[in-house]
Image (cartoon, rainbow, N blue to C red):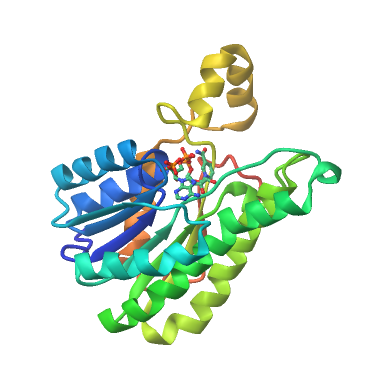
Amino acid sequence: METELKGKGALVSGASRGIGKGIALALAREGCSLAICAREQGPLEEAASELAEAGAPQVFARTLDVTDREAAEPFVAAAVEELGRLDVLVNNVGGNRRKSFEETTDEDWDDLLELNLLSALRLSRLAIPEMRKAGGGAITFISSIFGREAGGAGLSLYNVTKTAMISAAKIMAMELASEGIRVNSVAPGSIRFPGGSWDRRVKEDPEGMAEFISANLPLGRFGTVEEVANLVVFLSSPQAGLITGACIPADGSQGRSLI
Ligand SMILES: NC(=O)c1ccc[n+]([C@@H]2O[C@H](COP(=O)([O-])OP(=O)(O)OC[C@H]3O[C@@H](n4cnc5c(N)ncnc54)[C@H](OP(=O)(O)O)[C@@H]3O)[C@@H](O)[C@H]2O)c1
């Protein structure tokens, strides 16, 4: 299938490693120009070089903390200036803070709402006028299976914020459909990559993780970054023209949600 992404401009937040970098690389291989950000400069620069090698005609990489509200607007403006257009946004930055609900503080809620939800909404608001100018576009939120179903004790901060992303994507999809801007969310299961959280846990506790795999991962293995990235490429492509307002799992049936 021809993705028709060649020559498009794509912004992926948090693309210096892991899932975000995998998505940016997959979009680069389709011929997209890429704008990426992360907080740490070294890995971001390495990722930018890999994107150019993978075929991205233009790469714009800037150190940015997406929770810095003032920094988002100049980042998106500079990205559009460099790429010449913006057709694709992937809201990938996200994180977890595990603690019992009773121990969570207002600061925890402020921090995780900002990191997982508000920063993504802000980048989306800034991207929409640029997509309008380009004649349409695609926004994808990287949520989690724990945005679709209860993750369990200790996960209120993660669960609530990841669910809110799915909810926001659905309403945005309804509002923007008539302008050719599609909005979806993706719900990865447990994705392992070198240096990632699952990789660390497997190395620290191989037996415990073997039990986790046999109890929770029907495929008998973790998911890969490429398996999530391929889905995001498809959702970002005009080939996914009928898909908007959807939340699609990439989880090897790890999730227990019936819908
Ligand atoms: N891995 C999984 O199994 C899994 C499963 C379900 C959902 N997800 C979701 O998928 C997304 C990516 O996960 P991942 O495992 O690839 O994460 P990761 O390894 O922690 O990578 C996160 C990326 O975002 C950047 N980043 C983090 N905080 C940032 C901030 N405040 N501002 C700008 N950049 C920031 C990081 O670079 P710096 O540290 O240099 O900023 C890095 O490039 C997250 O939303 C996560 O919740 C992951």
Task: Looking at this view, name the residue that lies furthest to the right.
Answer: 102
Viewer-nearest residue: 197 or 248: 197
Residue 242 seen:
no
Viewer-nearest residue: 12 or 23: 12
Q: How many marks?
A: 0
Name above or below for residue 23 compared with residue 120: above
Q: Is residue 48 left or right of residue 123?
A: left
Residue appearing at x 51%, y 16% in the figure: 203
Name above or below for residue 246 compared with residue 36: below
Viewer-nearest residue: 47 or 184: 47
The quadrant holding residue 80 is: bottom left
Residue appearing at x 19%, y 71% in the figure: 84
In the rendered image, which quarter contains the C terminus?
bottom right
Q: Is residue 209 left or right of residue 102?
A: left
Residue appearing at x 57%, y 76% in the figure: 171
The quadrant holding residue 19 is: top left
Q: Is residue 174 left or right of residue 147?
A: left
Place of residue 119 in the rendered image (x, y in percent of width and height, measured from the top left): 52, 61
Task: Looking at this view, name the residue that lies furthest to the top.
Answer: 207
Residue 19 seen:
yes
Residue appearing at x 59%, y 14% in the figure: 205
Place of residue 152 in the rendered image (x, y in percent of width and height, measured from the top left): 75, 41
Name above or below for residue 194 compared with residue 179: above
Place of residue 41 in the rendered image (x, y in percent of width and height, measured from the top left): 34, 41
In the rendered image, which quarter contains the N terminus?
bottom left
Name above or below for residue 183 compared with residue 226: below
